[in-house]
Image (cartoon, helix red, strand yellow):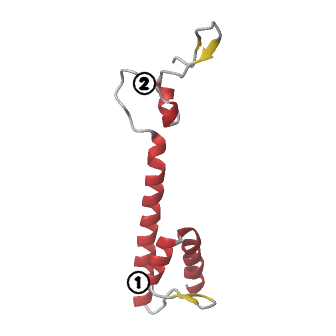
Amino acid sequence: MRGATEEPDQDGTAQPSLPTDAAARFLPCSARVNPGRPATVCWMTWIPIVVLLVIIGTDLWVYTDARKRTEGGTPVALSIGALEVNTPTVWFVACLILWILFFPAYIVTRNQNS
């Protein structure tokens, strides 16, 4: 496996070059230099996509779980001052807008109502 090497600059000083082996695939997109090779999608491009899919997936789970509990007679309800989150649709929208706050709140409220 070849690693980074130092190549002399025009003035004779050594400048580090980027690795050209498989490890270069894990460099940030802006640091990748692959002349003569086909362009590849950087692994960092997938992180926001995966996070978004996880958030949407958990939001759909919250909606279906809240709907089943409401139909079963034990709705998951949360009241914080004037804010009331008590229907599956409201839980879904709340989780969609502020997932980092409402998804954990749903899990805690769901376990308290069991």
* Residue 34's disc number: 2
Q: Amino acid at mark 1?
A: Arg
Mark found first going from the N terminus, 1 or 2: 2
Q: Position of residue 43 (x, y in %)?
A: 46, 41
Image quadrant where one finds the C terminus:
bottom right
Type of amino acid at the residue the image marks with label 2: Asn
Position of residue 111 relative to residue 18, above or below, is below
Q: Position of residue 107 (x, y in %)?
A: 56, 75
- Residue 67: which disc? 1
Asked which secondary structure carries label 2, the reply is loop
Q: CA distance from mark 1 to mark 2?
A: 51 Å
Corner quadrant of residue 7: top right
Where is residue 48 drawn, in percent x and y? 47, 53
Nearest the camera: 7 or 105? 7
Q: Specify few, some or many for label 1: CA neighbours under 10 Å numbering under 14, 14-19, or 20 or more.
A: some
Q: Quadrant of residue 108?
A: bottom right
* Farthest residue, direction front: 11
Q: Secondary structure at mark 1?
A: helix
Label 2 crowd (10 A; few <14 / some 14-19 / many >=20)? few
Which residue is more in the foreground, 85 or 9?
9
Give the residue displayed 58% in from the left and 80% down from the top: 111
Residue 65 at x, y percent in the picture: 44, 78
How many marks are shown on the rendered structure? 2
* Residue found 45% across the figure and 77% down from its top: 93
Q: Is residue 15 above or below residue 98?
A: above
